[in-house]
């Protein structure tokens, strides 16, 4: 092989690339001709695509709504648990304070000489 042949081979895209490009171009051209030559089929296809898109939108909105409701319920539950924990801690602190007060009163009642 000489240098010119090597340069020409390197400059050409591979056959699989050319084939894939031809398939894509043919598909686009065929779809365009179909829409141009068959307006009724195009309208039906457009309507079908629109209906599918609307159904997808509705399903997605419903699923997002359900997910949002589950998140709100989980946050509410977590908040209720947090309030319950806060109340338990407040009760324990109040009980501890009463116990400290009881012990302080008992110590206060003991005469100074006994200490």
Image (cartoon, grey):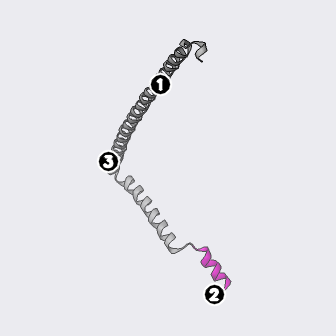
For residue 92, which numbered disc appears in the image?
Answer: 1
SS type, badge 1 = helix
Q: Are marks 1 and 2 in contact (CB under 8 Å)?
A: no
The image shows residue 88, relative to residue 59, as above or below, that is above
Q: Is residue 108 magenta?
A: no
Q: How many marks?
A: 3
Q: Which residue corresponds to mark 2?
A: 1
Query: In this picture, which residue range is highlighted in magenta?
Result: 1-12
In the figure, is residue 37 to the left or right of 105?
left
Q: Quadrant of residue 52?
A: top left
Q: Main secondary structure of the magenta part?
A: helix
> Where does the C terminus fall, quadrant-wise?
top right
Labels 1 and 3: the sequence-earlier one: 3
Q: Please name the residue shown 36% across and 37% down the image.
A: 66
Q: Are marks 3 and 2 in contact (CB under 8 Å)?
A: no
Q: Is residue 4 magenta?
A: yes
Looking at the image, the residue that sits furthest to the right is: 3
Looking at the image, the residue that sits furthest to the bottom is: 1
Q: Nearer the viewer, residue 21 or 52?
A: 52
For residue 16, which numbered disc appears in the image?
Answer: none
Residue 81 appears at what percent x and percent y? Answer: 42, 30
C-alpha gap between disc 1 and disc 2:
93 Å
For residue 44, which numbered disc appears in the image?
Answer: 3
Labels 1 and 2: the sequence-earlier one: 2
Q: Quadrant of residue 70?
A: top left
């Amino acid at each position: 092989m000489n240098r010119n042949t090597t340069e020409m081979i390197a400059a050409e895209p591979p056959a699989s690339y050319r084939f894939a490009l031809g398939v894509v171009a043919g598909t686009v051209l065929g779809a365009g001709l179909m829409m141009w030559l068959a307006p009724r089929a195009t309208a039906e296809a457009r309507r079908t695509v629109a209906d599918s898109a609307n159904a997808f939108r509705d399903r997605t909105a419903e699923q997002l709504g359900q997910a949002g409701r589950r998140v709100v319920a989980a946050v509410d539950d977590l908040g209720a648990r947090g309030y319950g924990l806060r109340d338990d801690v407040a009760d324990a602190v109040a009980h501890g304070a009463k116990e400290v007060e009881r012990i302080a009163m008992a110590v206060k009642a003991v005469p100074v000489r006994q200490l």
